[in-house]
Structures are given as C-alpha cells and as structure tokens.
C-alpha cells in the first residue's frame, strides 16, 4: 500500500511539473533559444547580493555563473538554488522600428528580461 501511495505521489508531481513546463513552452512558439545559463545570484534593491534565485521583481538584476546578467521586466516569485535559465528572444516591430524582446524560463516559469 505504501508503494502505491509513493507511486501515485510521484506521478502527480510529474504531471503538475509537466503542465507548468508545457505552458511556458506553449507561450514560446516563435521564440528562439539564445542560450542556457546557470543562475548564480541576484541583487536586492539595497545592493546586497544573495546566492539563490528568488524570482523576478521589476529592475532586479539576475547574475549568471559566466559573469553576465539580465534585468527583470516582470514579477514572479520562485525559489531555487543554482537553477538553469533558458534565454529566449524574438524580433518585434513597433512603428517601423525592430528590436529584440527577451524572455527567461526558469523551472517552467517565464519572466520578461532585458
């Protein structure tokens, strides 16, 4: 009986993780994967750096292990230690001007970045 409960729990976790993952990818149709990077830390508003990922706040800098960083343009909470970020881009045109728009997927959740 205990094995059945454990198996059912694992299946439920797998399905819910897949649902989050697939919804981020469903919203990514037409985007290009530019790179994958390991998140090293982020910077609080006070300037203090913390060695984990706690999601995005507008203006928050997220630092990667390769000494590069992105700045969040959307908000969302998530906690993970050294997760992999998938960086996506897409060309967008507005009033005759074309620019690259960026997104970051971390553990199935999508964030706007620049």
Image: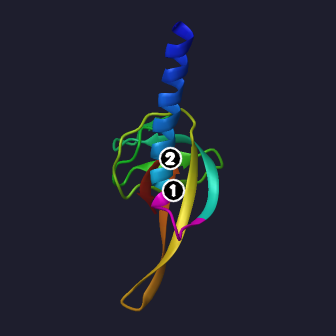
Residue position for label 1: 25
114 vs 4: above or below: below
**Would residue 51 be seen by someone viewing this image from the given angle?**
no
**Would residue 63 be seen by someone viewing this image from the given angle?**
yes
Range shown magenta: 25-32
31 drawn magenta: yes
Crowding around mark 1 (Cα neighbors within 10 Å: few <14, some 14 to 19, many 20+) is: some
Left or right, residue 34 beside residue 98: right
Provide residue 15's location: percent of width, then percent of height.
Answer: 49, 37
Instruction: Name the element at disc 1.
Output: helix
Residue position for label 2: 21
Which residue ends up furthest to the bottom in the rendered image?
Answer: 96
What residue lies at 66% left-to-right and 49% top-to-bottom? 66
What residue lies at 54% left-to-right and 53% top-to-bottom? 69
67 drawn magenta: no
67 vs 81: above or below: below
- Which secondary structure type mostly characterizes the magenta part of the structure? loop
Q: Are marks 2 and 1 in contact (CB under 8 Å)?
A: yes
Instruction: Name the element at disc 2.
Output: helix
> Residue 84's image quarter?
top right
């Amino acid at each position: 009986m205990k094995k059945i409960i454990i198996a059912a729990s694992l299946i439920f976790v797998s399905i819910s993780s897949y649902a989050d993952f697939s919804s981020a990818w469903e919203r990514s149709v037409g985007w290009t994967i530019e790179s994958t990077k390991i998140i090293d830390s982020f910077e609080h508003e006070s300037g203090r750096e913390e060695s984990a990922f706690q999601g995005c706040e507008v203006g928050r800098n997220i630092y990667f292990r390769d000494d590069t960083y992105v700045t969040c343009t959307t908000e969302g909470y998530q906690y993970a230690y050294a997760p992999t970020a998938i960086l996506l881009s897409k060309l967008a045109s507005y009033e005759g001007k074309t620019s690259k728009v960026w997104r970051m997927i971390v553990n199935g959740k999508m964030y706007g970045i620049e």
